[in-house]
Amino acid sequence: MVARSPFGTDEFDSRQFRTAMGQFCTGITVITSKNSDDEPVGFACQSFAALSLAPPLVIFCPMKTSRTWPAIAERGTFVVNILSNRQQAVSAVFGAPGQDKFSSVSWDSSPAGMPVIRDSLTWVECTVETVTDGGDHYVVVGRANILGDVLQDKPLLFYRGGYLSTEHPRVTPAQEELDNFLTWNGGDTWL
C-alpha cells in the first residue's frame, strides 16, 4: 500500500491561517488588572493555557497593539477570569474596543485588589514572570498566586468564529490518554 500525503499548501494568507486555527476549540478568558490610576482594565483572551504545575504557571498572548496590555505589564499583576457559558455578553464587552468595560459587568476585588468578574467558572491571580516576542503578540508567562472558587457550570467556548456550548455528556478518556494532560482533574494519582 502506498502512503497518501495530506493535501495542503505553503501559500496561504492570514485569513486562511485564521480559518485553519479556528478549527481548534478554545475557552474564553478575560484578563484583568488595574492601570496606574487604579482603574480596572481588561480584555477578552482565547490564547490562554495552563503551562506548569510546579511551579504553577499560566500563559497568555496579548496582541502588541492592545491598549490594555501596557497597563497590565506596568502593574505586573493580573487575573485570568475563565468565562462560563452564561457570559457571552461579558466576552462581547471585553472583546470590543472601548474605555469603560467594567460599567456593565459585575466584579469584585481579588486579595491583591485586582478585578475578578462575577460568575466566572474560576479565576487565578498571577504575577508576570516573563514576556517574550511572539510575532504580532507577546507571550506572557504568569505565576499563579491565588486561585478562586470553582463554579459548577459549563465553559464558554469559541469555535470556527462563534460561541459553542458543551451540551453533550462528558466523556472521560482512558488513563493512558490522560497522562500528559496538564489540566486533568482526576486527582494527583497520575502524577
Image: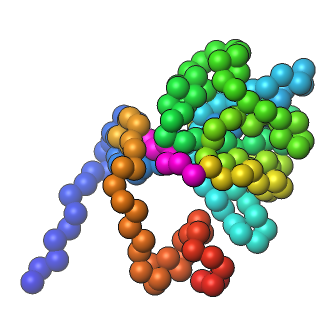
Q: Is residue 87 above or below residue 131?
A: above
Q: Is residue 107 above or below residue 141?
A: above
- Determine whether, in the image, residue 16 is placed left or right of residue 118: left
- Provide residue 127's location: percent of width, then percent of height: 83, 49
Q: Is residue 175 above or below residue 39?
A: below
Task: Tell me which corner region of the image, top left, top right, bottom left or bottom right, holds residue 22.
Answer: top left
- Determine whether, in the image, residue 167 is placed left or right of residue 185: left
Nearer to the camera, 55 or 157: 157
Identify which residue is drawn at 84% across, 26% down.
35
Q: Is residue 53 above or below residue 78?
A: below
Nearer to the camera, 154 or 4: 154
Which image quadrant: the C terminus?
bottom right
Magenta span of residues: 152-158
Task: Tell me which corner region of the image, top left, top right, bottom left or bottom right, holds residue 186.
Answer: bottom right
Identify which residue is drawn at 75% across, 42% down.
79
Name of the residue lying farthest toward the front: 152
* Magenta stretch: helix, strand or loop mostly: loop
Task: Tell me which corner region of the image, top left, top right, bottom left or bottom right, holds residue 70.
Answer: top right
- Provide residue 13's location: percent of width, then percent of height: 36, 37
Nearer to the camera, 101 or 152: 152
- Provide residue 114's location: percent of width, then percent of height: 83, 36
Which image quadrant: the N terminus?
bottom left
- Determine whether, in the image, residue 158 is placed left or right of residue 96: left
- Total residue callouts: 0
- Provide residue 34's location: percent of width, then percent of height: 83, 29
Identify which residue is drawn at 79% across, 33% down.
108
Nearer to the camera, 174 or 43: 174
Identify which residue is drawn at 74% across, 50% down.
148
Name of the residue lying farthest toward the left: 1
- Determine whether, in the image, residue 141 is placed left or right of residue 1: right
Q: Is residue 157 visible?
A: yes
Residue 60 is one of the magenta-drawn residues? no
